[in-house]
Image: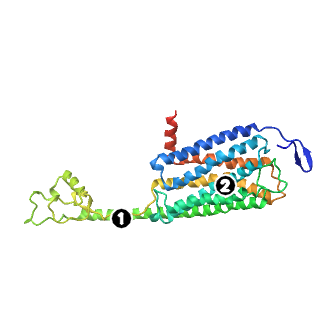
Amino acid sequence: MPANLTVSNQTVPPDTSHNFPALVFGILLIVVIICGNLLVCLSVYTEKALKTTTNYFIVSLAVADLLLAVLVLPLFVYAEFQGGVWALNMIICDGLMAMDVMLCTASIFNLCAISIDRFIAVSIPLNYNRKHVDQRQKLLLAATWISALAVASPVIFGINNVPQRDPSCCKLEDNNYVVYSSVCSFFIPCPIMLLLYCGMFRGLRRWEEARKAKLRNNNVRGRAKLQHAVTLPHLTRPPPSSPPPDIQRNPPDLKLEELAHFSRRDCPFPPGYKDCPIQTIAYPDRRYAHTPPIKKTAKINGRERKAMKVLPVVVGVFLFCWTPFFVVHTMRVLCESCDITPQQMSVVTWLGYVNSALNPIIYTVFNTEFRNFFQKFLHSFC
């Protein structure tokens, strides 16, 4: 650490005060992020009910948050504890900046990948694999991390090595790169993600309307067929010359228990009768009602609908936490007349890091399967 700092051509003694509140808050934040996101990964790994495609993307997001807590936050907390003065090697600073850019970018790219995956699930549900990650989804997961690495690669290749670099300050030195990374990491993916979610929820609304209309039509047809069955005078009986040897009574004379037994068979008539109509499911007034076979169609189950309701909350919290940082971070470079203090930068940066601790809390509040696993896991240690 240098003996003094130069500000506006005036030599002032360095600020040697330590920020103990930042140290305490930073340590607590790191512990919460690690514990919460580890539980997310462990729950998907151990619970069969949570092994869905959407949750695999959520695990990828949790891994990004875990790496942020392990590789970035300790050094950031140390710098905050030192009063914002960087006292370590500049190579470590460049590594910190590269990992910070990469992991924050990976977080938002993972959210964008989730929105793409959900949009595909709603748009072409018949061709969507809900249980296992297929080749398309593997490529999407790999693309999020490769793209995040590409955005951070200029720092790795030395873009921070500018002349007259201040060794007491660890930050991105190239203003053009600040704008470039902010646009690639935030200002382009976020609108795309929001548009995809809007399209997804429009598709869900159309799906629900079509499903309700189909149920109404089925109910109307079912009531009409039921009424028709009730008005039938009697069922056709076999000719008297060819009665089945083991049947002595006609179907209308059978007991209710026997009718219930026949209703569970593919043929509603007693053994020995020649003609079998379509499968019977009810006997109103001891007469036979017939229904058409049910066709299987692709559908979005209740668990997936709940997951889709959780994801917008995750996205909304992410935008709330990271939008101030990227706006202030960009304005600090583009607006020379804007007076942005180090304290303001520190606040918006902390707010962004808090997002990594909020995602597991959101899952436990809005997702029953995650909440049950968290409760079961915590009860096992209590």
Residue at the image position 75 percent from the left and 50 percent from the top: 91
Q: Residue furthest top?
A: 382
Q: Would residue 201 be visible to someone looking at this image?
A: no
Q: Label 1 is placed on what type of residue?
A: Lys
Where residue 316 sits in the image (x, y, percent)? 62, 54
The image quadrant that residue 152 belongs to is bottom right
Q: Is residue 354 above or below residue 132?
A: above
Q: Residues within 10 Å of mark 1 (few under 14, many from 20)?
A: few
Position of residue 154 measured from the top left corner of the image (x, y, whole percent): 72, 59
Viewed as shown, does residue 224 lie left or right of 241?
A: right
Residue located at (10% from left, 57% from top): 246
Side of 30 where 379 appears, left or right = left
User: Residue 295 bears which disc, if any?
Assistant: 1
Q: Earlier in the sequence, mark 2 or mark 1?
A: 2
The residue indicated by pointer 2 is 102
Whether residue 272 can be seen here: yes
| Image coords of residue 199 (percent x, y) | 56, 64
Looking at the rendered structure, the kind of residue marked 2 is Met
Using residue 174 as the reference point, say whether residue 105 is left or right of it: left
Q: Nearer the viewer, residue 279 or 156?
A: 156
